[in-house]
Image (tube, rainbow, N blue to C red):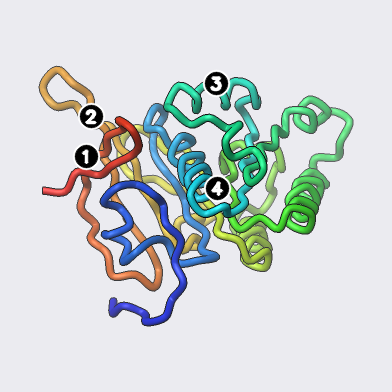
């Protein structure tokens, strides 16, 4: 794919990755961060928001559908990301309250409630970034009856928000398996995270499986975290 001139991009701040992406993710894209458990998917989504807030003052919202806010922040602080430094530009929404009230809500209306929260945040905060953690939990809570149709409408709705969105997606340990909802097709980009055993160690790898409007490699690169995320290119 030829490089699209004049296309606005946003940095991931993952060392080496933005070079692979011709400078970053195309602005207002919807990107899946997909992989098996333990592949630091949520950490990567948080990291992208955190460093855009820290370095550029760009506002982001992280929506956690499973892990509570305190647990999330504690884990990110363990990786050296102090949320207090970006609290003016980065918001964390824990949907636990809604989840605990699921018995009192009509499941068919849950997605509308979820959208209302996101829309209100967008209007009030003017955020440029959004992370949703995670898609399988969202599907379960919304009890989608027609996943392909419902996800298509949800992705269209996200596009209308005009923010750069990262959606965490849990996948099986073996192979690349997307659901019948077609999220792999609907998304603009896919970061795939994978664990591989190398002798007596388990190492983390990452590939850009897909990124529209971008001429990129599809190699699997070792992904490490020291002072920050970095892909190791040979």
Q: Which residue is mark 4?
A: 53
Q: Are marks 2 and 1 in contact (CB under 8 Å)?
A: yes
Q: Secondary structure at mark 1?
A: strand
Mark 4–mark 1 distance (CA, rounded to whole Å)? 26 Å
Q: Quadrant of the N terminus?
A: bottom left
Residue occupying image coordinates x 51% and y 63%: 29
The label shown at residue 222 is 1
Marks 3 and 2, how far apart in space? 23 Å
Between discs 3 and 1, the one toward the N terminus? 3
x and y percentages locating residue 57 in the rendered image:
57, 52
Image depth: mark 4 or mark 1 in front: 4
**Residue 124: quarter of image:** bottom right
Q: Please tell me in which quadrant of the rendered image residue 204 appears.
A: top left
Give the residue pinned by disc 2.
203
Mark on residue 74?
A: 3
How far across and down, in percent of the image, does residue 43 sit? 46, 34
In the rendered image, the vertical position of residue 50 relative to residue 180, given as above or below: above
- Say what secondary structure mark 3 lies in: helix
């Amino acid at each position: 794919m030829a490089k699209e001139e004049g296309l606005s991009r946003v940095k991931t701040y993952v060392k080496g990755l933005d070079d692979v992406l011709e400078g970053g993710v195309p602005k207002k894209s919807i990107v899946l961060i997909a992989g098996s458990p333990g592949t630091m998917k949520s950490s990567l989504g948080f990291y992208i928001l955190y460093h855009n807030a820290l370095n550029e003052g760009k506002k982001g919202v992280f929506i956690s559908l499973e892990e509570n806010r305190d647990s999330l922040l504690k884990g990110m602080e363990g990786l050296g990301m102090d949320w207090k430094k970006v609290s003016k530009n980065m918001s964390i929404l824990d949907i636990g309250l809604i989840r605990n009230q699921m018995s009192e809500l009509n499941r068919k209306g849950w997605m509308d409630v979820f959208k209302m929260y996101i829309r209100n945040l967008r209007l009030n905060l003017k955020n440029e970034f959004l992370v949703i953690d995670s898609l399988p939990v969202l599907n379960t809570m919304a009890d989608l009856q027609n996943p392909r149709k419902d996800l298509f409408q949800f992705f269209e709705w996200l596009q209308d928000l005009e923010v750069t969105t990262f959606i965490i997606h849990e996948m099986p340990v073996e192979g690349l398996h997307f659901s019948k909802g077609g999220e792999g097709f609907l998304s603009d980009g896919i970061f795939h995270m994978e664990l591989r055993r190398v002798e007596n160690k388990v190492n983390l790898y990452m590939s850009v499986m897909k990124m529209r409007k971008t001429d990129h490699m599809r190699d699997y690169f070792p992904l490490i975290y020291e002072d920050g995320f970095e892909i190791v290119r040979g």
